[in-house]
Image (cartoon, grey):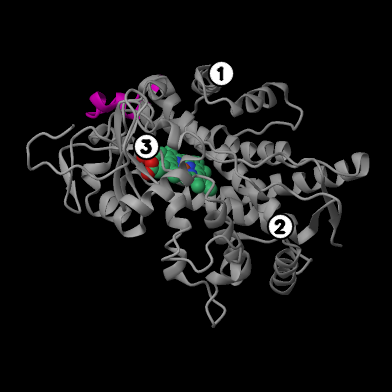
Amino acid sequence: VGCKTSHFKNPPGPWRLPIIGNLLTIMHDPHLALTSLKQKYGNVMQIHIGTVPVVVLSGFETIYQALVVQGDDFKARPDFYSFRFIGNGKSLTFGKDCGDVWYERKRMAQRALKSFSTSSNPMSLSSCYLETYVTREAELLIDKFIDLMKTAGHFDPYRYIMLSVTNVICAVCFGRTYDYNDKELTELLELNSEFGKNLIFRFTKFIQLIIHDHNQNHEMGNIRDITDKLIAECRMRSQSEYKHKALSNDDITSIVLDIFGAGFDTVSKALSWSLMYLVSNPTIQQKIHAELDAVVGQNRLPKFSDRAQLPYMNAFILEMLRHSSFVPFTIPHSTTRDTNLYGFDIPKGRCVFINQWQVNHDPDLWRDPFIFRPERFITTCGKIDRNLSDKVILFGMGQRKCIGETIGRLEIFLFLAILLQKLEFSVSADVTVDMTPIYGLTMKHRRCDHFKVCARV
Ligand code: HEM
């Protein structure tokens, strides 16, 4: 079945049932099920979801070969029904297009993101916009946690983390932030647990209104945020020889939607997983405190420029990304043409899953992969082991690689450094936190209402 000629060599895979294929095997925790199938069938295997064949790639080298060395062959997205509604099918993340227009949009989104994150902020003493925004939100978050301790004695940090991270991406995209009690934003974020048409519709409406507002108040010499920058590029192009490449309002909406959507959920999950690891590993938290005290002290706030001097904090973040692997698969890929990977034939248009979780728990790469041990990333000279840290994959690789990796990593670092400089986190003595991941495009943990903080000064 599926052979084009007698020489066509399909990747191996498990026996399947008619109609449902291997659905029953991979329905629950597919990252674990596919990791265990990999033991039997290898790094390039094929399963069936219903009647649809899907190639599943595991192993660092194999994934590197496909996404980087043969990157042009594996850079498309499958035409899933659920992807068609995102950004009216024009999403640069989920859309079908992966040619020149897509490439140019991705570059444009990258440039816009850089201008309002890591570029210097002329209005502030911080090193860049992102530092200004994260510092402000982290300080508000500390006040909120201390306040919640005074009123209730314990709390669930998730909602507030999500609002703070959303405010950072709102500042980058729209030049504005929202109050913790803002009805419009909190309702929208409550919806985020459903990845459905309704959510996409509400998000699109929310962003369309902001873009409409920006269009009304746009001044060419005063570019305040990503939305302004995209509108400016769009207006400039519509008057130039690149008229045919001009962006419509719909295009701007879909780019902003892509950045906004990817930017708040992932970083919020990273921070909330970090807090879970900190309260379940008090000794590790103490080591981070000690390092912060020695390098930053209490007389000033941590900054991006402290990052290189805080190897233990960096090792903790790497281990949190590796151990949780909270983005277990990349977004599905698909092939742009007939191709061959390590001797296996893969036809054009084949859906491809990339199992990041497997790489991050591969016993060939990691000693005791299930143990949470930041020290594994620190060399005998006390520096981060770059060879090893490059093996953690959570942002994809190659042409479809995440465009928010730099700012995602910076945000996680600075939020944690500021929170941990001032606070010690714990849970009530009789509580054990449940770290079992709940499967999804991004994995969450069960909410925990028993967090406590204690001020460190
Ligand atoms: C794509 C992970 C933060 C914007 C992706 C992909 C992964 C990922 C796994 C898919 C790669 C693939 O399909 O091969 C993460 C993680 C983050 C993070 C773990 C934080 C810890 C961000 C942030 C932004 C962002 C902060 C924007 C501000 C995007 C975009 C894409 C993407 C636009 C689509 C790229 C494409 O389809 O070509 N990310 N991401 N991400 N990410 Fe991120």
Magenta residues span 235-250
Image location of residue 149, percent across then percent down: 88, 45
- 451 lies above or below 199: below
Going from N to C along the chain, the mark reached first, 2 or 1, is 1
Identified by mark 3, the residue type is Pro
Q: Secondary structure at mark 3?
A: loop
Quick check: is the Cβ at mark 3 less than 8 Å away from ligand 1?
A: yes
- Which residue is disc 1 drawn over? 202
Q: Earlier in the sequence, mark 3 or mark 2?
A: 2
The residue labelled by disc 3 is 332
Which quadrant holds residue 169?
top right
Residue 357 spot, x, y in % from top left: 47, 50
Which amino acid type corresponds to the residue marked 1 in the rendered image? Answer: Arg
Which quadrant would residue 11 be assigned to in this image?
Answer: top left
Q: How many neighbours does mark 3 have within 10 angstroms: few (below 14), some (14-19), or many (20 or more)?
A: some
Judging by the rendered image, the residue that carries numbered circle 2 is: 278
* In the foreground, 84 or 259: 84
